[in-house]
Image (tube, rainbow, N blue to C red):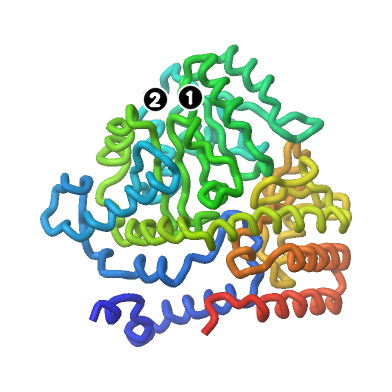
């Protein structure tokens, strides 16, 4: 009986064929397009089923056992499962699974520890060097309301210089030191960041949104043992629904919970929390550990392949799921490279590079990632093929015949590694 109310496609197609048609077209796009966007992935059918359940219908302000509405006994079950699984998977003291998105999770950290428009400082990586919009960008509420001081990567190595970050922290005396980024491909030294925060009496906050799934699978060092607070989204390398989670030390649990609800959000999305519980369970499996390892080795293979094609890989390589690449050596910018790749069936995103001389809307680089291909089972040989396709397409971007050939090669890959087969 329950299955009648989970993802009832026939009912949707009959009730609203326009929406059903758009969804069907999106499925077809996913099946024909290679997903190299580092912040995207494929949730499992089990995750999608939980999210499409009738828990969508339940309003449940508050926390398990402490709700403002009746009838919450079953959403309490799934939220408690999600909390306990998050704590067990990452070895955390406390987990809040209610944030609707990464931005809300990050806002909860501000709400828990900072006063708006005060002298409280946050030390974080600037957006142009791989930080995130919510890490103090002046167009975001984080930059409008809170006092951010930015650090940069080293100009020569394009990697973090921990001595310089320490010197800046001692000069600025921030209340929070923020690490964790959206376009930084290298392993982050959590011991160094913990030491920097301790030197100035600051909290250490890590935004692990991009690499948290790699941490779950043991393919990237976890920040949880070192940080006071860790925020992350659940839909990138963790392969879950769109949403977020906050982990923290026990001493900060009450402040974080109050900042999520009632300060930042109202009723939680319990159907999404059910899907979070499912993806956290999936991340505990041996198969997930193999997936995480495959993500990293595939990214390294892709980065090396792109370098072989004449594209400059920022920092010389990658230790994670993504590579940041300067496409100027092949005679174009990131905006055009994104468009050419789209024409041949490869989804990437244009991206600024450190010390980029080009504007943000037409930057010098692209960002590529392997979480999606790794979920489909692709590995190093396929990423070498993908790098060859990208290089061929970019070099011959005005040659329609070559681009058709490249698209056919992408189609062959997608047929070998289908998305949601059947």
Is residue 126 left or right of 259 when viewed as pictured?
right
> Compared to 135, does 214 lie above or below?
below
Provide residue 6's location: percent of width, then percent of height.
32, 75
Q: Residue at x 74, y 68 (%)?
A: 382
Residue 347 image-quadrant placement:
bottom right
Which picture quadrant has residue 107? top left
- Callout 2: helix, strand or loop? loop
Q: Is residue 126 left or right of residue 51?
A: right
Can residue 186 be seen?
A: yes
Q: Nearer the viewer, residue 213 or 4?
A: 213
- Residue reaching furthest to the left: 70
Q: Position of residue 57 (x, y in %)?
A: 23, 65
CB atoms of marks 1 and 2 within 8 Å: yes
Judge whether 211 appears above or below 41 on screen: above
**Residue lying at 45% horizontally and 41% vertically, measured from the top left:** 231
Q: Quadrant of the N terminus?
A: bottom left
> In the rendered structure, which disc, 1 or 2, sits on the residue that comes first in sequence?
2
- The residue lying furthest to the top in this view is 171
Query: In the image, 150: left or right of 356?
Result: left
Which of labels 1 and 2 is toward the front? Answer: 1
Mark 1 lies on a secondary structure that is strand
Q: Residue at x 34, y 87 (%)?
A: 14
- Separation of residues labelled 1 and 2 (CA atoms): 9 Å
The one of 38 and 111 positioned closer to us in this rendering: 38
The residue tagged 2 is 114
Q: Position of residue 25 (x, y in %)?
A: 53, 79
Residue 247 point in image, percent of width and height: 40, 39
Looking at the rendered structure, which numbered label has been put on residue 176?
Answer: 1
Residue pictured at 62% horizontal, 18% vertical? 166
Q: How many marks?
A: 2
Q: Residues within 10 Å of mark 1 (few under 14, many from 20)?
A: many
- Residue 330 seen anywhere in this rendered image of the structure: no
């Amino acid at each position: 009986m329950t299955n009648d109310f989970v993802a009832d496609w026939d009912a949707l197609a009959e009730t609203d064929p326009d929406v059903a048609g758009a969804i069907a077209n999106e499925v077809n796009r996913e099946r024909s397009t290679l997903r190299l966007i580092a912040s995207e992935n494929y949730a499992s059918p089990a995750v999608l089923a939980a999210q499409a359940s009738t828990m969508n219908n339940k309003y449940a302000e508050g926390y398990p056992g402490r709700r403002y509405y009746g009838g919450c006994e079953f959403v309490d079950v799934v939220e408690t499962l999600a909390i306990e699984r998050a704590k067990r998977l990452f070895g955390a003291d406390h987990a809040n699974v209610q944030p609707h998105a990464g931005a809300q999770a990050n806002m909860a950290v501000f709400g828990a520890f900072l006063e708006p428009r005060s002298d409280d400082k946050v030390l974080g990586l600037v957006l142009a060097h791989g930080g995130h919009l919510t890490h103090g960008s002046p167009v975001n509420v984080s930059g409008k309301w809170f006092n951010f001081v930015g650090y940069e990567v080293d100009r020569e190595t394009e990697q973090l210089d921990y001595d310089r970050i320490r010197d800046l922290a001692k000069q600025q005396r921030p209340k929070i030191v923020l690490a964790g980024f959206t376009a930084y491909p290298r392993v982050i030294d959590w011991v160094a960041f913990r030491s920097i925060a301790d030197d100035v009496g600051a909290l250490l906050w890590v935004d692990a949104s991009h690499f948290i799934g790699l941490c779950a699978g043991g393919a990237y060092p976890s920040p949880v043992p070192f940080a006071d607070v860790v925020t992350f989204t659940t839909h990138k390398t963790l392969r879950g629904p769109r949403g977020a989670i906050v982990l923290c030390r026990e001493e900060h649990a009450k402040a974080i919970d109050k900042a999520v609800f009632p300060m930042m959000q109202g009723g939680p999305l319990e159907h999404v929390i059910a899907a979070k519980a499912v993806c956290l369970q999936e991340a505990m499996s041996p198969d997930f550990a193999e997936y995480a390892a495959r993500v990293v080795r595939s990214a390294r293979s892709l980065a090396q392949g792109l370098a072989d094609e004449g594209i400059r890989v920022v920092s010389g390589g990658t230790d994670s799921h993504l590579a940041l690449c300067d496409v100027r050596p092949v005679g174009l910018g990131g905006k055009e490279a994104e468009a050419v790749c789209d024409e041949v069936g490869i989804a990437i995103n244009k991206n600024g590079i450190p010390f980029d001389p080009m504007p943000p809307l037409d930057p010098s680089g692209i960002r590529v990632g392997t979480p999606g291909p790794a979920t489909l089972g692709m590995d190093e040989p396929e990423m070498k093929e993908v790098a060859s396709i990208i290089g061929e397409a970019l070099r011959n971007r005005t040659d329609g015949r070559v681009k058709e050939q490249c698209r056919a090669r992408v189609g062959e890959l997608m047929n070998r590694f289908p998305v949601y087969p059947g």
